Image: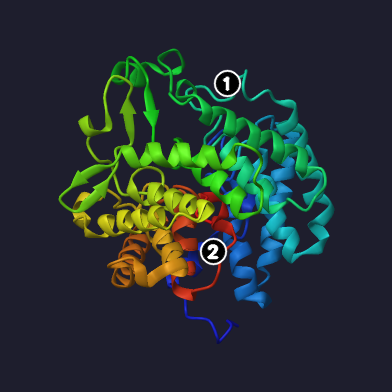
Amino acid sequence: MANNNMPSLPTGLVDLAHSLRNPPALRLKRGDEVGLANGLAGIALLPLTLAPLFPEQGWLDVAGSYFARIAQETRERPLSDPGLYHGCCGIAFTLSLLAQQDCRYHNASQALLARLVRQVTSWDWRAQPFLPGQQNFEVIGGVAGILRFLLTQRDEPEVQSALGSLLAYLIWVSEEQERWPHRPERLGAIAKKHYPQGYLDLGLAHGLAGPLAALSLAVLHDYVPSGLREAIERWSTWLVDQQLAMPWGKDWPSVVPLQLHAKDCSPTRSAWCYGTPGIARALWLAGRALADDSLCALAREALASTLRRPAGERNIDEPQICHGVAGLLLICLHFAHDDAASTPGLKEAIPLLTTALCTRWIASYAQMSPGFLTGAVGGALTLIAALTNRESLWDQVLLLS
């Protein structure tokens, strides 16, 4: 029996949730079976979100069954990657949410957290590139994403040393622009062909907006080691300087080739991973961290520019979080929660984006992969957030708050 105080959810969302009750039956992409991005840890966020809404339907037990399969998979293939979306950190994040609702998982959550801390503190982030073709500082597989999760665990004594080392690393990266680019020797053949001298990545998922958001959130959680505010100022100033003037207002490219300036580039999609929405949120958090009202105002205007951009040119047709309409809607929901009245067009945009997501998601969820970041579960979670107007903890991993 549903909670009568909650809005009804789309039939397709209920159908999807019930189809995912049996994790052993899921066929997942090889190599991505357990992670947060599109594996079991990400899919488990749906039953974890449904559990407090419908406590009599057994969703916590469903979430627990996901971790039983994760335990089996990782016994066979242990995770050496500490990253948020494909490694130990993402599993630790989802397990921590389960432990908050079900104390039976507390010990398992603490044990996995301790393992993550050991991985983080044993790695020399400055000297050793961790991910081929990616940057150690990024959200998806690097330090920015891990830092965001560890901020939620900051009361645990063993976490303090890991937080200190991650913050020190990001501050160190910020100090020299030579440390920011993707160098050609670490690029794949296709990327090297397009960017023979390398490039600077601006996006929230893989680029400099990610560590900017992470450092800003650290300040908002009362971590202010030496050099942190200067790092935030450095990266936010650089990102602001890369903005493009478009007919609809402010916009940003996805990357800037090293031989060019941003003004020589074209705007990218209006998404969470790349484009103005994700960058705007990072700049907003930076403005909050620095108590810089002008930077917050610039971030609001950047989001308003996206909302003025013709919908057909946003290139976010898919009903998913990473590079789809769900990501833009989530960012709008966060801005609305913080400061709805100060962002032109935001109040009107949210119901339109919710309707667009719902329509596209219902039409395609059955053909989508079930995953969180680029799959059906992420779209479903976003719909729940929009339709129930309840605070979500799962979207902390997107570094929106």
Looking at the picture, the colour scheme in use is rainbow
Query: Left or right: 171 with respect to 69?
Result: left
Q: Quadrant of residue 121?
A: top right
Q: What element carries label 1?
A: loop
Estimate how packed mark 1 is, as few (under 14), some (14 to 19) or many (20 or more) residues with alpha carbons within 10 Å.
Answer: some
Q: Where is residue 235 in the image (x, y as percent from the top left)?
A: 45, 37
Question: What residue does disc 1 label?
Answer: 129
Q: What residue type is labelled 1?
A: Pro
Quarter of the image containing the N terminus? bottom right
Q: What element carries label 2?
A: helix
- Nearer mark to the viewer, of 2 and 1: 1
Q: Earlier in the sequence, mark 2 or mark 1?
A: 2
Please name the residue shown 35% across and 49% down the image.
271
**Taking 299 as reference, is 31 above or below it?**
above
Q: Where is residue 105 in the image (x, y as percent from the top left)?
A: 79, 56
Estimate how packed mark 2 is, as few (under 14), some (14 to 19) or many (20 or more) residues with alpha carbons within 10 Å.
Answer: some
Whether residue 301 is visible here, answered yes or no, is yes
Q: Which of 71 and 296 is in front in this view?
A: 296
Q: Are marks 2 and 1 in contact (CB under 8 Å)?
A: no
Q: Which of 302 and 271 is in front in this view?
A: 302
Q: Determine which of the numbered discs, if any, sits on residue 50 in the image.
A: none
- The furthest residue to the left: 247
Question: What residue does disc 2 label?
Answer: 17
Q: What residue type is labelled 2?
A: Ala
Please name the residue shown 46% across and 69% down the image.
337
**Taking 147 as reference, is 136 above or below it?**
above
Whether residue 34 is visible here, answered yes or no, is no
Q: Nearer the viewer, residue 145 or 30?
A: 145
Please name the residue shown 36% across and 66% down the image.
358
Q: Where is residue 276 in the image (x, y as percent from the top left)?
A: 33, 48
